[in-house]
Image: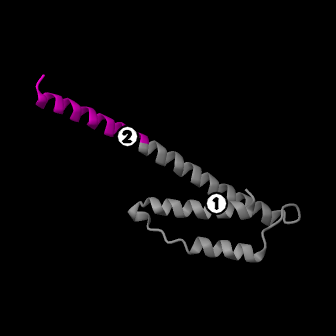
């Protein structure tokens, strides 16, 4: 087998690996998206429960709630760009909300 054929074989192998990588990436993004949506949904449910049963479940202090609202409102996101740093910003905010809401 000559050098040119070996290169073509390796290029084909790389192409196949890239297809597999793309597929795995799509599955990872889908799983991550589902996890974040579930985390946000859980926070919404907890807030609803706290509002309905305020004597059973302590609601965060007003200042804490205001700070959390400000934190979410100040998120600077550009969804159309699909940037990893936007995902990181969202995750940091969710982590902060989780700690204050005791999730």
**Quadrant in the rendering for residue 64:** bottom right
Mark closest to the chain's N terminus, 1 or 2: 2
Q: Which quadrant of the rendered structure holds the C terminus?
A: bottom right
Q: Which residue is rendered at x = 55% and y = 49% of the image?
A: 34
Q: Horizontally, is 55 left or right of 61 in the view?
A: right
Q: Give the range drawn in magenta.
A: 1-24
* Crowd around label 1: few <14 · some 14–19 · many ≥20 (10 Å): some
Q: Horizontally, is 25 left or right of 45 in the view?
A: left
* Residue in the foreground of this view, choosing between 71 and 79: 71
Q: Which residue is rendered at x = 72% and y = 73% of the image?
A: 65
Q: Horizontally, is 19 left or right of 55 in the view?
A: left
Q: Which mark is residue 21?
A: 2
Residue at which label 1 appears: 95
Q: Which quadrant of the rendered structure holds the N terminus?
A: top left
**Quadrant in the rendering for residue 66:** bottom right
Q: Which residue is rendered at x = 54% and y = 71% of the image?
A: 75
Residue 17 in magenta stretch: yes
Q: Which residue is rendered at x = 44% and y = 68% of the image?
A: 78
């Amino acid at each position: 087998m000559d050098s040119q054929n070996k290169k073509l074989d390796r290029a084909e192998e790389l192409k196949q690996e890239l297809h597999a990588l793309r597929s795995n990436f799509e599955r990872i993004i889908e799983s991550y998206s589902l996890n974040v949506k579930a985390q946000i949904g859980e926070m919404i449910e907890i807030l609803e429960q706290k509002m309905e049963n305020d004597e059973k479940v302590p609601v965060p202090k007003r200042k804490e709630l205001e700070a959390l609202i400000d934190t979410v409102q100040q998120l600077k996101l550009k969804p159309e760009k699909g940037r990893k740093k936007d995902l990181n910003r969202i995750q940091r905010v969710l982590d902060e909300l989780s700690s204050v809401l005791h999730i």
